[in-house]
Image (cartoon, rainbow, N blue to C red):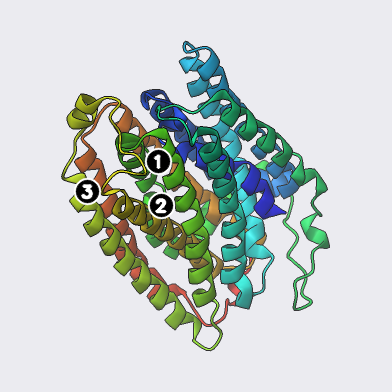
Amino acid sequence: MLGFVCFMCPGLFNSLNGLGGGGQIDPTTSANANSALYATFAVCAFFAGSINNVIGPRLTLLIGSGGYALYIGSYLALNIHPGAKAFVIAAGAVLGLCAGLLWTAQGSLMLAYPTEAQKGIFIGIFWAIFNLGGVIGSSVSLGQNFHSTGNQVSNGTYIGFLVLTGIGTLIPMLMANPHKMIRSDGSKVTTPRHPSWKTEIYALWVALRTDPWIILLFPMFFASNWFYTWQFNDYNGALFNIRARSLNNLVYWLSQIIGSLSIGLLLDRQLISRRVRAFAGWAILFVMVFVVHIWGYFYQKDYTRASVLAEGDHKMDIYDDGYPGRIWFYIFCGILDAMWQTTAYWLMGAMSNDPAKLAHFTGFYKSLQSAAAAGVWRADAVGIPYMNLFLSTWILLVAGLIFALPMIHMRVKEHTDLEDEVL
């Protein structure tokens, strides 16, 4: 059910963003809205673990999912009233507050419900269902726009997304409370405590002080959404017409399902020790980062913002020469993204099984991820060269992996110790 909340809300948001420019001709409004979104997301996510522990994950999910319908509705308003750009940016800022709540509650539950032996596959299953939202959304967009040779999506696409997102906001009302949950090995899920705000804010500091190794994952967290800007706006949005953008978007989210399930199965492989699995996951990510970015460099060196602007409406279509190689590249981008996010969650899950502590960890993750995303979407809006954004993506991913290596060596154990269970 948690997967389906994210299927309907963030999944369809991803599908819309993945079209480049939110499906619009001019990507500037979308880039500014995303910058506002991730700025408020970064602030909210830092405290969202405390909010989640005080009001409970069901209510946190319910409030969090509401912002997605507003955001998608703002693009429909922009299609009807081209002067509604300020509304889209304001809706982005509101969504940032809601998304901080939703993703923190999601991360806490997803990492607390499985047994230690199931964490990788639970993350993989969640990520697969969540990305089905992107797949369904992309399919709707592709069906609506397949015969269009223009560069902007229709009102019908936005209305379809809005209806599905509205359904998604109702799902948390049907979910069981965590204190009723029993794991498959018979153990109870630790009931999140409901302390005062003062105690919870102090617990943020305690989480950092008692588990300082989490700081070495901060560069990995920081890089984890940075690449979306170049992939969505500066590759998919810049080079392709709406039909090709929709098809690229569809295969991108399909490939995420392959990426998350494959790395999830590896990270849970019980025949191999947990430490070996952690290092194997790191090595796969390292190889994938270089494969994807060496490949991408050969495309990026051939175009700039000026050349894209000069070509105007002459965008690449699915029947053009050179398109097959470009869509395969985009598939590998999707696989890398899913592997990166799944491994980051798995590493946090290896540090504790306590929902309250994991709520703080996932809050750190989403806060840093969003602070980085706010900066890079703004950089795109002000016209930083495509190549600069591409190279910054590559460098940050490599840096994230290098910093994570000593944390894996020192902190990932065969079993989570009891003192790591609680704050």
Secondary structure of the residue carrying tag 1 is helix
For mark 2, does the 10 Å Cα neighbourhood hold few (<14), some (14 to 19), or many (20 or more) residues?
many
Q: Pointer 2: what residue?
A: 224
Q: Position of residue 84 (x, y in %)?
A: 50, 14
Residue 129: mark? none
Cα–Cα span, label 3 and label 1: 16 Å
Query: Which label's residue is closer to the chain start, 2 or 3?
Result: 2
Q: Pointer 3: what residue?
A: 299
Secondary structure of the residue carrying tag 2 is loop
For mark 3, does the 10 Å Cα neighbourhood hold few (<14), some (14 to 19), or many (20 or more) residues?
some
- Residue drawn at 52 percent across, 67 percent down: 346
Q: Nearer the viewer, residue 61 or 359?
A: 61
Q: Pointer 1: what residue?
A: 244
Can residue 47 be seen here? The reply is no
Q: Position of residue 8 (x, y in %)?
A: 65, 43
- Residue drawn at 34 percent across, 70 percent down: 405
For mark 1, does the 10 Å Cα neighbourhood hold few (<14), some (14 to 19), or many (20 or more) residues?
many
